[in-house]
Image (cartoon, rainbow, N blue to C red):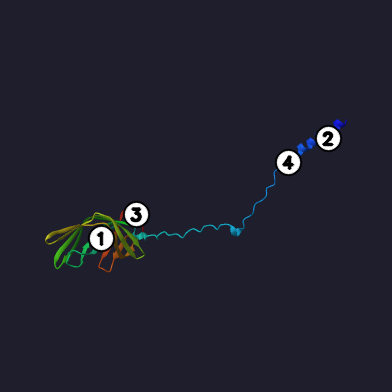
Amino acid sequence: MVLLAVSVVSFLAAGALTVVALAGADTPEPCCAGPVAQADALPSPTTAPPATRAPALPQCLVGSWTTSDETLMVKFYTDVGKLPMTTSGRSYEVRANGTVVERNQNVQLVGNHNGTPIRLVINGTREFRWTATANTITYRSVTRTNLSWTYFDNRGELSTERDKPDPNFTETNSYRCEGGQVTESNSGGFHSVWKRTAGYGYYG
């Protein structure tokens, strides 16, 4: 009996240890919360930089044009100052991306020097850049060109000159949009009237 009692006690003790061990295995260990960041210690959101896009170009200038009446001041003779010469028929594509394409096909400029008729014939194309405000247009940087100018007077053909790209080219004129027409001028005697044509783009 004593042996049995001891065995029973040992059995019960062993069972109790097993229960405790199992209970300990099934119960998750408590997790201690870490430190909480203070609001003023968190990084601030990044502010977007201000926009740096260029202002839009005046839409009334964008499109295809042909000159209907022009007066240009031309250095015709090397020993004479610039002379006024009139013409029409030069074509332009004024593009919204800030480029201009000029096209000339046997465009004739005519003038007079001391009673002698003079003539200048322009052929070819060239491309340059443009910007504008509400009342001025600026041309810059001839990037591509194959223009040629041929000079004539009463003696016949005098010479032919060929254009070259010019990154330093700049010219600023006043302009006014009136429906399908643009009037351009400057204080040096230049005057031009453009008429809109059904080519590149159309903006009112």
Q: Which residue is mark 3?
A: 201
Q: Nearer the viewer, mark 3 or mark 4?
A: 4
- Asked whether residue 63 appears in the rendered view, the answer is no
Task: Identify the disc placed on residue 180.
Answer: none
Residue 14 drawn at (x, y percent)? 78, 35
Residue 167 drawn at (x, y percent)? 29, 59
Q: Earlier in the sequence, mark 2 or mark 3?
A: 2
**Quadrant location, the N terminus:** top right
Q: Residues within 10 Å of mark 1 (few under 14, many from 20)?
A: some
Q: Earlier in the sequence, mark 3 or mark 4?
A: 4
Residue situated in front as seen by the camera: 142 or 36: 36
| Rendering quarter of residue 130 | bottom left
Task: Identify the disc placed on residue 68.
Answer: 1
- Asked whether residue 167 appears in the rendered view, the answer is yes
Residue sitting farthest toward the right: 1
- Name the residue located 74 percent from the left edge and 39 percent from the top edge: 21
Q: Earlier in the sequence, mark 1 or mark 3?
A: 1
Q: Amino acid at mark 2?
A: Val
Q: Amino acid at mark 1?
A: Ser
Q: Which residue is mark 2?
A: 9
Residue situated in front as seen by the camera: 152 or 6: 6
Q: Amino acid at mark 4?
A: Gly
Question: Disc 2 to disc 1, how far (Cα)?
Answer: 122 Å
Question: Disc 2 to disc 3, how far (Cα)?
Answer: 104 Å
Residue sitting farthest toward the front: 3
Q: Residues within 10 Å of mark 3 (few under 14, many from 20)?
A: few
Q: Residues within 10 Å of mark 4 (few under 14, many from 20)?
A: few
